[in-house]
Image: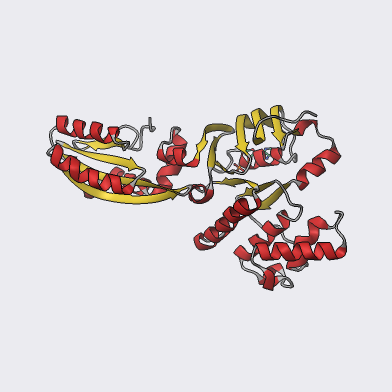
Amino acid sequence: MSKTTTDDIIDINHLRKAYATPNGEYVALRDVTVHVRQGSIFGVIGLSGAGKSTLVRCINGLERISSGSLRVLGESVPDLSARQLRELRRSVGMVFQQYNLMPSRTVSDNIALPLRHGRLSRSERKEKVHGLLDLVELGEHAKSYPSQLSGGQQQRVAIARALANDPKILLLDEATSALDPDTTRTILRLVRRLNETLGITIIVVTHQMDVVKEICTDVAVIDHGTIVEQNDAFSVFSDPKAPLTHRFVDNSTGLEHILQLLREGSPLLATKPGERLVHMQYVDKTVSEGLVSIITRRFGLSINILFASVDIVDGYPLGSIIARYSGTPASINEALDFLGDKGIRTTVIAQDGHTLDGYDEKTERK
Ligand code: ADP
């Protein structure tokens, strides 16, 4: 077995995974190339059935890949023996949507389960469990049973259990999908803290862009078994390329709600001849608000801000404004060029009473 020489803790090239079914072969992963940097929080986002869980099961060796290459922690997973695979799995902790705790065991016993065949003595095991309970802030629930805990607390037990063998990688498969938004945020904050304090690499598999927005440093978007986009989280949010990524981003930034109003013909978003509806995106709030008044004066335009929001993506602010511009076509074009030069992305979504391609229901985003 040869070790990789890159910094990537997971290195996947042209991975294909087909399942044998009674109706023939079903290709769940078509051509997946993904590189996960050590220490990153890497989001894998896709709709249900896209192949996310299959990818996770390949990464920890639960599924054999059909072709391509797959290296985890420098090891070529398809080449590992059964014993080596068991070893690899100790280095890759898993957390699922449904917690998968043993109902008849206490919280402490659940967390201790992965340690039972290890080399630790009884007292070392106790100490380890104690430390893990503290880490997930559940010390006072050591003797409780899972049914006595809230969903968020049960998920923290599952996270502590996944960390018992000091894994290098933590895989979260829809780990917050069953939780309410507040609890989701608490769990995500815990996950970020684990990443920062333990230096553990985290793979977050989700269908929720808000989860990606909250904690991920990098993102891969998966659609029908293919990675359609992969970049750092901020770039994915500020400059999405694939139509599916646009949908995820627009849903999570609130733009989708505005577009829906536009499609429904809401008078709020109507444009008259000579007017354009412009979506502006910027990375520095203070810059942009000043700029709107500057371009109003400099280009003789009337600009009416209809919607404004700021998202924090991977710790950086990303602002979004939808405004109605009125003025001559030439002056509006000059203003948009001016904004472009200042690093503000502008997209005209409706003009002279017509919604432009990509923003109505029939056409796909360019
Ligand atoms: P996701 O996690 O994104 O919802 P999955 O990886 O679970 O997607 O599934 C991807 C596709 O592969 C789905 O169409 C699913 O029905 C199919 N699939 C998953 N597991 C199997 C299996 N063991 N046998 C046949 N098809 C499967």
Please give the count of numbered marks on the rendered protein: 0
Q: Position of residue 261 (x, y in %)?
A: 30, 48
Depth check: 115 or 325 in front? 115
The quadrant where residue 350 appears: top left
Quadrant of the frame with the N terminus = top right
Rendering colour mode? secondary structure
Rendering quadrant holding ligand 1: top right
- Residue at 60% x, 52% y is 196
- Residue at 57% x, 53% y is 192
Depth check: 40 or 249 in front? 40
- Inspect this view and state whether residue 23 appears: no
The quadrant where residue 361 appears: top left
Q: Position of residue 16 (x, y in %)?
A: 66, 29
Q: Position of residue 354 (x, y in %)?
A: 23, 36
- Inspect this view and state whether residue 288 appears: yes
State left or right for residue 30 relative to residue 337. right
Depth check: 162 or 242 in front? 162
Quadrant of the frame with the C terminus = top left
In the rendered image of this protein, does residue 137 appear above or below residue 273? below
Depth check: 97 or 211 in front? 211
State left or right for residue 50 relative to residue 366. right
State left or right for residue 172 relative to residue 142. left
Q: Position of residue 212 (x, y in %)?
A: 51, 47
- Residue at 82% x, 62% y is 125
